[in-house]
Amino acid sequence: MRQVFNFFWQSISKYRVYYILMLIAPVMGACYKPIVYYAIKMMIDIITTAQNLSLRMLMPPLLIYVVADLVLSGLWRSSQVFLWKSEPYVQQGILLRALQKLLSYHYHFFQNTASGSLISKIKGLFDGYTELWAQLYYGVTFWILASITTGFSILWINLKLGGILAAWSVMYIIINYFLSKRINQLSQLQNNAKHVVIGELADSISNIHSVKLFATRKYEYNRLKNKIASDFVPKEVKLYKFHFKVGILNDILGIGIIIVMLLLMIQLKRMNQITIGDFVFVFSMVFQLQENLWHLMQEFHKLSDRMGDLKSSLSIYEVDQSEYAGDLNSSNSSNDNHAYAMGAMPSIEMPSIEMSNMPSIEFKDIWFKYNDNKTVFSGLNLIIQPGERVGIVGFTGSGKTTLVNLLLKIFIPQQGSILIDNQDIAHIDCDFLRQHIAIIPQDIALFHRNLMENIRYGKLDATDDEVILASKSAHADEFISKLSQDYKTMVGERGMKLSGGQRQRIAIARAILKSAPILVLDEATSALDSVTEQYIQESIQELLEGKTVLAIAHRLSTLKNMDRLIIVDDGRIIEQGTHDELLKVSGSLYSKIWHTQYAQTD
C-alpha cells in the first residue's frame, strides 16, 4: 500500500495545494446530511410541541438547511475548478514518466518482455491514478467522514445509542479491513493475468501479416481463448466470489445493527428519554450510518482492487535495467530517491568526449555470451583505423550483427572493452554514442507517422529541403513523389504500407541525413532489386567518403570495394584482407563463399 501511495503523492506533489483544497468539498459534504436531518428533527419537535405554529417558528431550521445547501454547492463548484487546474497535468506527467523510464531500459529488457504487456501496465498506471483519486475524493474520504459525523450526531443525542453504534462501527471496519487485504491480493493476481493476456493479444495483432500468411486465425483465437480460460478467468472468478461472500457478511451485519438500534430506541421512547424528533433523527441516522459504512466498504474494496492493479503496473519501475547513468531530465527531479519522479535514476553525468570526423574503433579482448549461455565471442580483437572501410563476412549466426550491437551498446560485453578514438565506450553516454553512429539496419521498423517524420528521424532539426535531398540521394524520392500525399503519406504500423525495398531506401535516406562520423551497414541493400541496388550503391559510395565504416552483407559484391574484409566464423576472426588478397588465398573461406555465390557468372 505504501508503494501505491508513494506513487500517488509524487505524482500530485507539484499540484498538492489544489488537491488539498479539493478535499474541502467532501469534508463539508460529509456534514451535510447530519445537518439537514438535524434541521428536520428541529422542525418535528417544533411542530409536535408548539401551541400556535407559525412560519417564523420554523425559520431557524429552514435557514440552517438553505445555508448548508448553498455552502456545499459553492464548495463542490470550486473543487471542480481545482480539478481542471491539476488533474490533466498530473495524468500527463504519469504517462511521460512511464515512457521515460521504459525508454531508458536496456534493449534485452524489451527482448524478454511483451510490448502489449508494457502498454497495458502504462494504461494501468494512468487509469489507476484516475480511479484511485476518484476513490479518495468521491469515495473513501467522503464516506469515512460521513460515517464519523453521523456517529457523532447520534452520540450527541444519546450516549448509550452512540456508544453501541460506535462499537458496532469499529467491529464492522476491522472485519472489512482484513477482508480487503485478501481482496488486494486476489486483485493483484487477476491484474497480472490481465496484463499477460493483453500482451498475448498485442503479439497476435502486431504479427497480423504472419497470421494471414500462415492462415492461423483459428490457432491464434484458440491460443488466446485457452490462455484466458486457464489463467485470467479463474482468477477473476475467484475475486468475484470473494466479493460475493464479503457482501453477504456485510448485509448480515447491517441488518443486525438496525434491529438492535430499533429495539433500543423503542425502549428509550417508552422511558421518555428521547423525543419524537430524536427518534426520527436517530433512526434516520442509523440507516444513514449503515448506508455510509456499506458504501465505505464498497469503495474500500474497489480501492483494494485498484491498488492491486496499480501494484502490478508499478512493476515497470522496479526493474533496475537502465542503460543511462544519469536520468533523461534530471533537472525536473528535486529528489533523486523518488522512484516515480521525472528522471528517476541518480543524476550522474557521463564524461563528455571529443570524437574526430573519422574515429578509430577497437574491439579489445571481447568476451560475450547471451543469457542462454551461448558464447559468441571469446577474446575477440579487432582494430579499425580512422576512415577505414571494413566489411564483415560470415555465415548466419557467426556474430556479425552482435558485433554491431556491442558497438552501439545495445549489449554489453562480459569482459573486454570497445574503444572509439582510444576512449572506452563504457564511459560514454549511450545517447551521445548513438548520435555519432549512423546505421542502416537489416530489420527496418518505421513509426506509424508520415514519411517526412520518419526520414527526419535521422536528424530531428533537418529542414524539409534537407530531408528531400537525402531522399533523392537514396532514390527514395522516386517512389515518394508518386504517392498521393508524397512526404505526408502515413506509412502504417512498423511501415507495413511500404514494401521491403521502400523501407530500406527510407533507412538509407535517414543515414544520409544523419551524416555521422561512423557508418554501420547491416545488409543495407538486401531488400532491393538489382537495378535499384546499383543506383543506391553509388549513393552509398558517396556516403562512405570521410567516414569510418563497418559493413555487413551476405551478398559479397556489395563489400568487394571495402578497404579490408574480416571473415568471422564461430565468433572468431579467421581471415582478413582485401577482396583480391582473399581470393588469391587457396582454400580460404572467403573464396569458397565468393565462388559459391558467383559460380554461374564465372
Image: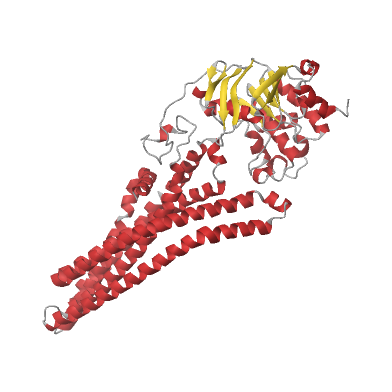
Q: Closest to the observer: 535 or 203?
A: 203
x, y percentage for residue 169? 24, 66
x, y percentage for residue 83? 39, 53
Residue at 19% from the left image edge and 78% from the top image edge: 279
Q: How many marks?
A: 0
Residue at 28% from the left image edge and 63% from the top image edge: 175
Q: Closest to the observer: 129 or 165?
A: 165
Above or below for 580 versus 490: above
- Is residue 179 shown left or right of residue 547? left
Above or below for 332 versus 377: below
Scheme of image coloration: secondary structure
Above or below for 78 versus 529: below
x, y percentage for residue 445? 65, 39
x, y percentage for residue 259? 24, 78
- In terms of image quadrants, where is residue 576? top right
Q: Is residue 434 visible?
A: no
Q: Quadrant of the C terminus?
A: top right
- Is residue 252 shown left or right of residue 560? left
Q: Closest to the observer: 583 or 531?
A: 583
Residue at 31% from the left image edge and 70% from the top image edge: 291
Q: Closest to the observer: 54 or 201?
A: 201
Q: Is residue 260 visible?
A: yes
- Is residue 87 shown left or right of residue 67? right
- In terms of image quadrants, where is residue 444? top right
- In terms of image quadrants, where is residue 420? top right
